[in-house]
Structure formats: C-alpha cells, structure tokens
Image: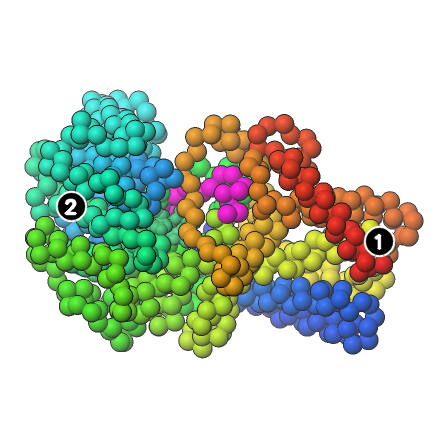
Amino acid sequence: MEPHQKHVVGDGTTLHACHPCRRTTFYRIYAVVHTCGIVALMYHHAHSLLTRRSSTLITSLLLLSDIILAFMWATTTSLRLNPVHRSEYPERYSAKPEDFPKLDVFICTADPYKEPPMIVVNTALSVMAYDYPADKISVYVSDDGGSSLTMFALMEAAKFSKHWLPFCKKNNVQDRSPEIYFSKYSHPKDDDALNLKMMYEEMKSRVEHVVDSGKVKPEFITCDQFRGVFDLWTNKFTRHDHPTIIQVLQNSEVDMDDTKKYIMPNLIYVSREKSKGSQHHFKAGALNTLLRVSALMTNSPVILTIDCDMYSNDPTTPVRALCYLTDPKIKSGLGYVQFPQKFQGLNKNDIYACEYKRLFDLNMIGLDGLKGPGYLGTGCFFNRRVFYGSPSNLILPEIDELQPNRIADKPIKTQDILDLAHDVAGCNYECNTNWGSKIGFRYGSLVEDYYTGYRLQCEGWRSVFCSPQKPAFYGDAPNSLIDVVSQQKRWAIGLLEMGLSRYSPLTYGVKSIGLLVGLGYGHNAFWTFWFIPISVYGFLPQLAIIYGVSVLPNIYDLWFWLYIFLFFGAYAQDLLDFVLEGGSYRRWWNDQRMWLIRGFSTFFFGFIDFTLKTLNLSTHGFTLTSKVSDDEEQSKRYGQEIFDFGSSSHMFLPMTMAAIVNFLAFVWGIYGLFFWGDRLILELMLACFAVVNCYPIYEAMVLRKDHGKLPKNVSFLAGILTFVLFVLGYVFLK
Ligand SMILES: O=c1ccn([C@@H]2O[C@H](COP(=O)(O)OP(=O)(O)O[C@H]3O[C@H](CO)[C@@H](O)[C@H](O)[C@H]3O)[C@@H](O)[C@H]2O)c(=O)[nH]1
Ligand SMILES: [Mn+2]
C-alpha cells in the first residue's frame, strides 16, 4: 500500500477519493527508455534478416517472438501509465435506510456436485445478511444445473435465515457466512450462539444427506408449503432438458423472523428452461434470464452479481458501492463498481499464482485510471440501466415490463408476474431480440464477464475499481495444477474469441475507447500468443547449445547487452509492480513461474482448441471449476506447497519436454563452457533460468512417490517427443 493513501480528503462530505500512484512518473520515463531498446532490437533482427547473418528460419522465429513480446510489453505498459487507488468513506453516506435504493443480487450456480449446495447456501446467507434494509434486498439464485438438491438447500437456507439474520444484526457479527463464522468460533459461549450453531449443523447434515442420496425424498421436506414443488422434477427432467422453475422461497412482504421484529429479504430460485436444440450461452445466458425475471419482480436499480462460491466478507459492502453509484457528480455515466476477486485458502506463497495479481489487481488499477476496470464476473455492483444501451441512448427491450426505469410495485407472487417470469425464462425467448447483442450480458465469448464489461465501456460507460482494505468477497481458487491450467484454458479461449471478433480491442476498441484502453484490453485478449515466445525461448537456444551453434549474440557483441537490459528491465518492473501492490517476493517468483508453465499448457492448448473450434473440428463448452476438495492428501500437499500433477494429461507434455530439454542443454552447456568457452553464454543463461524454474517438474518426475507426482506415461511420452525434437533440431541447425 502506498503511504499517500492515508491522508484525509476533501471537506468531510465527499464520499470517495482517487489517488494516482507515485511510481507513475518513473514508469513513464522508463517506458521511453525500454521502447528505445525494443526498437534497437527490431533493427538488429531486420538487419540480420536482410544481411542473412544467420539462418532465416531462426531469425524469423526470434523476430516473431520478439514482436509478440514487444506487443505484450506495450499492452502492459499502457496500463502502467496512470494507475490509481481509490478510497471511499461509507461512514459519511448519509441517506436514511428508507432512501437506500433497492438491491438485486444474482448468484449463479450450475452443478450440485462440483458446486456443493452448502456453498451456495452460505453465499446466499452472507448477502441476505448485509447491513442493508432487508426489505430492499432480493437474492435471485440461477441454477443451471436444474437441481432439486440445490433448491432443497435454498429452502433450508430460507428457514435458517430467520434465525441467522437477527443473530448477525443483534450481535454485529462480521462474518456473515455461517460456515465461516462457526468455524472461527467453534465453541460459542452464549446459549443463543450455541443453539444457532446446532441449528446450522443440523441443516448442513440434512442438506448433505440429501445431496449424498441424490434425491429429495418426501421425508426430508420440512416446509409443507413447498412440498408440491419437487413434483416438477419428473422422470423426464434432465439438466439439459427441463421446463422453467421459479420459486419464491422467501418473500419480504410477508416473511419475518419468529419474534416478528426483523423483515426477511426476498429469496428466489430460478432455473431457466433448457432444451437440447437451443443455445444457452452458459453463464451469460443465465444472467440475462435473471435480469429479466428480476425486472418483473423487483426491478431494483442496483444489481450485484456473484458466483456461488463468492461469499460476502464485509456486511457494509453495498454502502461502499453506493458511495459511487449514488454520487450525483458521476452516477449518470457510471455503469458498474467492480470489487477485486480475492481467494480464501491460498497457500502461503501461492504456488499456482491463483491470486492473479496482474489480472485482478495491477491491470484493474491501471484501467481504472483510464476508463475504469473490466468486469470480473463476480463481486460487481451494476447500475441496471447499463444493460440497456449507452448512457445517452436508451435501448428499449421488446416488452414494457422489462424496462429498466419502471417501478415494480406489485407483490412478487402475483400470478401474472409469475406467469410472465416463466415466459421470459423460456429457452426460445431471446430469439429475434437484442438480448446478448445490444441488451444485457453479451454473448460470443467464453469469458462473458470480461467481454461484457469491455463492450459496455465501448458504449461509453465508466466503471470504478473499489478495493477496500478488508476484502469484500472471498471465493475459491483451484488447488491442483490440472484444474488451474484447465480453468485458464477456458479463459484463454474466451479471450481469443474476444480478440478476434469484430469487436477486437485493437480495432473497434481503440476506436471507441482510445489507444491505451484498447491496448490494455488487448493484453488479455491475445493472452494465448504468449505461447510463441515462451516456446521459442524455451527450446531454440537450448537446441543451439546441444548442437553447438549460436543463435543469440555472444558476450563480446554489443547486442548481448541489449538482451540483458530488456530481460532484466522487464522482469524488474514486473517485480516492482508486484511488490508495490503488496505482494511478496516469493509469490512473485511463483507467479512468473506459473506464467512460463501456462505458456506451455494453457496458452498453447487454448490456441489449438480455439483453432479447432474455428475450423468446426470440435466444440468447447464452459467446463466448471470444481469447488470440492475431498481428497485429503491432495489438500495436504497443497498446504505444503508441493505441485500436484496427479492425473495424466496432455496438458503436461510440453512443459515436461521443456524441462528435459533445458536440463540437457544446461548440463551440456556447462560442460561446453570448458570446451568452446563463453560463446554461448546467453543461451546458457536462459537454460539455467529455465532449469531453476522447472525444479518442481524434476521433483515430480523423479524424486516423488506420492499420488501427485508426474504420471510415468507423461514423462515417457515427453521423452520420446524430446528425441523427435532433437532430430528436428539436427536437421535445421546443423
Ligand atoms: O453454464 C454455466 C456455467 C457456469 N455458470 C456459473 O458461472 C460461475 C463461474 O464458473 P466457475 O466454474 O467458477 O469459473 P471460474 O473460472 O472460476 O470463473 C471466472 O471466470 C468466468 C468466465 O470464464 C466468470 O464467469 C466468473 O465470474 C469468474 O469468476 C459459477 O458460479 C457457475 O455456477 C453458470 O451459471 N452457467
Ligand atoms: Mn470460480
């Protein structure tokens, strides 16, 4: 955290303040210097190409890699030119609770086995218990799994909330996810808390029991009111083919706690209609359904979207968001307020770099200083109006009932509202409408979040990054390598879909939001291309060592120093960014290592999958990240910061090859130092750097015996492929 953030701002009535980072001036100067370096390097390559000083193939590969590296550097730099921090002062927010705007919360879930219903329950309870007038909160849960188990769990949640919410408010509890609260205070002292803990444990065991048995048997149902609902799950019902189910599980107009002192918020279960033949657009489709259903029922001007695993960690969060969303000076053009994604349970040095500091933090503060952060899919408060055209041009939806400015004043359980709600959740409802193209969350990319935020910004909406000291939300991050690289492969594919669409940040984006923001979005949109420079520098110089030819300048060449300068300059700046934003050195090291690993897995296979899809040779879907960790040994290994390969996957092949090639090159290069002297010093330095980075792979290949080690067949296949590579290298280099 930078020191200037502490000072008090304004006249004591401003609700928020913005502080530019102090490093900016230095960064701008450095940007000029580094650019000169890059230009010189390009000259060097062009010169070698023209004078054919070395093989054309090698120079072209190096040139291509360096062009991509330079592009990536430029995109990162565009986000370093004006990063800002913000602070807001919720204690100064003076509106009376009855004047607070209504708030709709959207929670998405999609599979009761990968996303256990108890997780959804805790997330829902944590937001229902916000420090906010309860009659103004409506929680909508979208269940793309269409699961009676999830519905059952939420029914239980509604019942439990009548005890939980009063308890939180009376005792000013800060952890409003009961799971977190009771794991922190596992031995409550007073009777109230003890009772409640028992009640929670009982609910949990009922829900888990139902999930284990896979079916809601009549004897489990304790609320007579909802008995009939489960009949909707007939024998023909499957998750990919079923009618719409909408159930109001709690209704703020009538539901109160037992003492009749506390009003309960709305809780509504929505599972949109599914059928085999129609497009569902994954999460974006689910969110658009909620947008419509909520428009009919409550039509709140403020919408919070969260993933089912992102529980609230701070009950005052909505008021923080209101500090921006209701500020008359900015509110008319403000589309959304994004909170960072933070994760619970990361190990100390975050071996898989799941904190995503660059993605979720550094890039966001960079964008915030320009035009506002992207949308991260969760932890984001929207102005409902943002989904209906640019700030100056309202695009009306096909029916009046869905208009963003309409006041929804009928009771939510009115029959015609429920009927219409079923209608708008139908799977053919969106045909021939603007949903997904001009209205609502945008379709066309697997990362609907990032893409939607970007499109909204292109329309002229501003956004704000709100990153309070106490994290507003906590979610789950994957904790085995295969989960990490698969999640990011989905992202990489979705981002490339965005990058190569007709709304590409480099063309459309630059035109509508300016060069810097366009470039900034381009950084992620073209993520996959990292695999090119990473593979070239991960294999080519190493093969060169093996065959004793040089591909990079030697130490007596002036160009040698240019390479040294660019490498260390870029790395040092990355480290500086990371540490100045509160990261540790070890986490940074792991972050850069994961970047290399992603280069050989996520980015490479993401690119291949995208290409296959484009050629219509395969399809790709939204593979959910699993939120269950019942493998105790694996969790233990994660805690000990040991890499978990475990299952055998082709994703591990290229990185294993790189590990082998670099090791051989390093050994051969050291030996060669005595033979041919320091001619190949740059190549050797690269191999050495890679070997240090590959340490966990060597360990997993040869030293470990546990279940997380690298499967033998992967090592074996990688060995064979390495041999093939050596043969190819011989053909081209010798
Ligand atoms: O068909 C689908 C698929 C997913 N989801 C929900 O989408 C959310 C995110 O899915 P998850 O498997 O957790 O993906 P992550 O990669 O962890 O999610 C990140 O990346 C996604 C885009 O790929 C964003 O939507 C998320 O907000 C962002 O946290 C979850 O709540 C799911 O229930 C649906 O509702 N319907
Ligand atoms: Mn997730």
**Is residue 227 positioned above or below 314 on the image?**
above
Horizontal side, residue 214 vs residue 560: left or right = left
Query: Residue sitting at 25 percent across and 55 percent down?
Result: 290
Residue 440: x and y in percent read: 29, 64
Residue 486: x and y in percent read: 50, 47
Query: Residue sitting at 49 percent across and 39 percent down?
Result: 479
Horizontal side, residue 582 vs residue 69: left or right = left
Residue 68: x and y in percent read: 62, 65
**Is residue 519 positioned above or below 698 on the image?**
below
Classify mark 2 as within 8 Å of ligand 1 or not, answering yes or no: no
Query: Residue sitting at 73 percent across and 47 percent down?
Result: 722
Q: Nearer the viewer, residue 208 or 2?
A: 208
**Is residue 260 positioned above or below 199 on the image?**
below
Numbered label attached to residue 304: none
Horizontal side, residue 238 vs residue 455: left or right = left
| Whether residue 27 is visible | no
Does dot 2 land on a helix, a strand or a loop? Answer: strand
Does dot 1 land on a helix, a strand or a loop? Answer: loop
Which quarter of the picture shows residue 224? top left
| Whether residue 424 is visible | yes
Instruction: Read off the residue under disc 1.
Output: 547
Report the amino acid beneath label 1.
Answer: Tyr
Q: Which residues are magenta?
A: 465-486
Query: Residue sitting at 61 percent across and 33 percent down?
Result: 709
Numbered label attached to residue 248: 2
Q: CA distance from mark 1 to mark 2?
A: 71 Å
